[in-house]
Amino acid sequence: MPKIAVIGATTWGTTLGVIWAQRGHYVRLLARTDEEAEDLRSNKLYNLPLPSGKFPTRLSFTASPEKALDGVRAVVLVVPAQTMRRNIRQVRHGITGKMLVISASKGLEIETGKRMTQVIAEELAPECRGNVCVLSGPNLAREILGEHPAATVIANEDLDTARAAQRLLNTRQLCVYTNTDVVGVELGGALKNITALAAGVADGLGYGDNAKAALMTRGWAEITALGVALGANPLTFSGLAGLGDLIATCASPLSRNHHVGMELAKGRKLEEITDEMDNVAEGVGTTVAAYRLAQKLGVGMPITDKMYRVLYEGLSPQKAAGELLAAETHHELEGRKWRLMQAVRKSSGKS
């Protein structure tokens, strides 16, 4: 069976390593230090609910990039978005044009606003860039570790490359679909975290399911509007990497971003909330990047705007919610510099 390297000792990275090793792949997970690798081996880092009580024998842990990448078919990066550039620089010399390079991180780089596949491609040799894919979908790690079924999407502009990654990564627990809209799949996974923060706030304030359903729907339209402005196919946001991921992340108590929103609604400080978490809530950083992109493109994103002000300008969650509810209403597919009407007509073949 082919070998896979997983870069990043996150809960999601470890989960992917487990399910691929269970399928029969030899998986090497790259930790930051020898100590972290040992903590992973003994399951002390996250105390994951492993199906058999221990890690599969084909999953190994190392702090050596050379050992992790030796002879692998695919390199899967599962690191926080703001450390992606640093991580790809640490391993890029071991990546060849024969390897698939897959981002399983859901965020945008704050400084540049770039997607993770863009960041990765910039740091790789030209002959490797066509092999860069994105993996995204409604994938809560602990459910997958508990052997509950799930589905996800692998995207590359070349369908044959996406299918090659699909054949490699598909498992009994995780059904992998393909797509060629890298921009849409990646933005769906990143931007839904902002709406999940807002959904957590709504739940924390006790607003009920009607309000949260409205918030999720408006968030989905907002995500689609920015995605279309950046070149995505609007239909992608109706799929697993868009609507599917949005539902899971906004509704589940396992969602880190939803948790942050709920804690903010209690009046807690952002730093206090994030300091006690084992993994990064990507929506916190992505809110900054998306806010700046929206400002640059002139795209109206009211939910993103309010969450930015809550996170970074001291706006109270209660006041933010009140301002959203009092917002001027219009056709639900219209907004400042939204092109959803035109995109829908184009996708349906209407002139």
Image: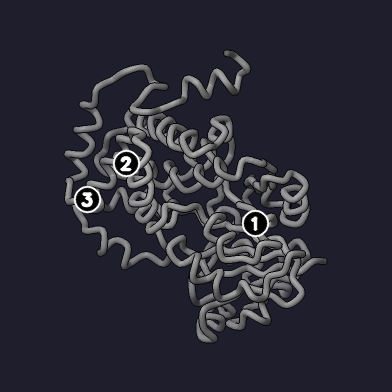
Distance between the alpha carbons at the discs numbered 2 and 3: 29 Å
The residues tagged by marks 1 and 3 sit, at their Cα atoms, a distance apart of 41 Å
Residue lying farthest to the bottom in this orientation? 34
Visible residue check, residue 142: no
Q: Residue at x 54, y 31 (%)?
A: 234
Q: Residues within 10 Å of mark 2 (few under 14, many from 20)?
A: few
Q: How many marks?
A: 3
Give residue 217's position: percent from left, percent from top.
41, 30
Q: Is residue 351 above or below residue 233?
A: above
The residue indicated by pointer 3 is: 266
Which element type, helix, strand or loop, lies under badge 3?
Answer: loop
Is residue 350 in sight in this rendering?
yes
Furthest-right residue in this view: 1
Q: Amino acid at mark 2?
A: Gln
Residue 72 appears in which quarter of the rendering?
bottom right
Residue in view at x 57 percent, y 13 percent: 351
Q: Is residue 312 above or below residue 239?
A: below
